[in-house]
């Protein structure tokens, strides 16, 4: 107690100064409209800023939940469309990308679906915009996918305008583009032509969007076009995908393998 009194006595002048300053400030604010309004305005600004930060954080988590719900609804709608179109053997399983590379020659992505969800090696992966890739390895809860922006991935495609078939390959340079090969010189190729899956493999049903022709070059003496395709799928922003589960895929692959 004596130590406390000594401290108060030592700093008594300073404490009196602080009390008087606070009192003067309160009198100034309470008795003058402008300072009072300025103080209230500042306080309101601080509260508004805090509320805005809370809304942004809350909105972020709400938006994430809405995006996941929207992805699930899109998948359910696609399953209904497949049934209406008579593709009764096709079922789409929604999934989320949890890891991905886009700047390597052998890019890959990991999805949060595995064998417990019916995922199998060789199944196709798409998103709302178009083709993504093919399942390579499967774990219990996760699967690794080779995207079409992997130099080891080939995809059978066709022109939507005339069903002419080609093979989609990636040159390892830009995740926005791929190359369409095996298109003969007599074929008329125009910028903007739409490329879709051919349906010649059980991995993807026919008609899934792939991309559009960016440009095409045919040098004198060449037998095939050099075609650059702008992909519909934006791999830099890829988050939600769908696994294409074809009930007939295993049977078809076994029949094809029996020809060897």
Image (cartoon, rainbow, N blue to C red):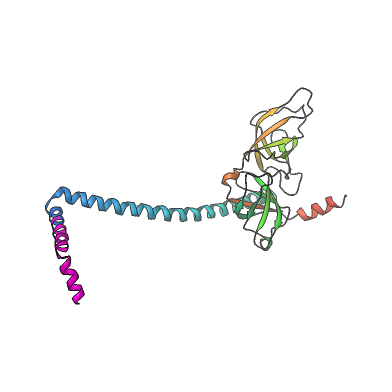
Residue drawn 74% across and 24% down? Answer: 219
Q: Residue 179 vs residue 75: left or right? A: right
Question: In x, y percent, where is residue 159?
Answer: 71, 35
Q: Main secondary structure of the magenta part?
A: helix
Residue drawn 74% across and 29% down? Answer: 225
Residues drawn in magenta: 1-24
Residue 97 among magenta residues: no
Residue 15 among magenta residues: yes
> Quadrant of residue 110 in the image?
bottom right
Q: Residue 159 vs residue 3: left or right? A: right
Question: In x, y percent, where is residue 143?
Answer: 67, 57
Give the residue at the far right of this rendering.
260
Give the residue at the far bottom of this rendering.
1
Residue 17 or residue 91, whichever sits in front: 17
Asked if residue 4 is positioned above or below residue 254 in the image, the reply reads below
Question: In x, y percent, where is residue 213?
Answer: 66, 33
Residue drawn 34% across and 54% down? Answer: 50
């Amino acid at each position: 107690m004596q130590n406390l009194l000594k401290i108060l006595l030592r700093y008594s002048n300073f404490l009196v100064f602080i009390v008087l300053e606070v009192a003067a400030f309160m009198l100034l604010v309470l008795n003058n409209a402008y300072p009072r309004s300025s103080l209230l305005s500042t306080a309101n600004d601080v509260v508004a800023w805090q509320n805005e930060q809370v809304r942004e954080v809350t909105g972020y988590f709400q938006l994430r939940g809405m995006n996941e719900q929207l992805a699930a609804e899109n998948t359910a709608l696609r399953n209904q469309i497949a049934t209406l179109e008579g593709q009764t053997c096709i079922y789409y399983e929604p999934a989320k990308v949890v890891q991905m590379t886009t700047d390597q020659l052998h890019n890959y992505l990991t999805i949060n679906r595995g064998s417990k969800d019916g995922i199998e090696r060789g199944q196709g992966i798409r998103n709302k915009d178009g083709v993504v890739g093919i399942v390579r390895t499967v774990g219990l809860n996760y699967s690794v996918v080779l995207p079409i922006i992997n130099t080891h991935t080939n995809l059978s495609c066709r022109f939507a305008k005339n069903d002419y078939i080609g093979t989609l390959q990636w040159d390892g340079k830009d995740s926005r583009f791929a190359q369409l090969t095996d298109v003969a010189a007599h074929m008329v190729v125009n910028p903007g032509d739409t490329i879709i899956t051919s349906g010649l493999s059980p991995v993807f049903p026919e008609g899934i969007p792939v991309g559009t022709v960016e440009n095409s070059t045919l040098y004198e003496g060449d037998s095939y076009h050099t075609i650059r395709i702008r992909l519909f799928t934006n791999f830099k922003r890829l988050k939600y995908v769908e696994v294409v589960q074809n009930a007939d895929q295993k049977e078809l692959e076994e029949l094809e393998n029996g020809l060897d």
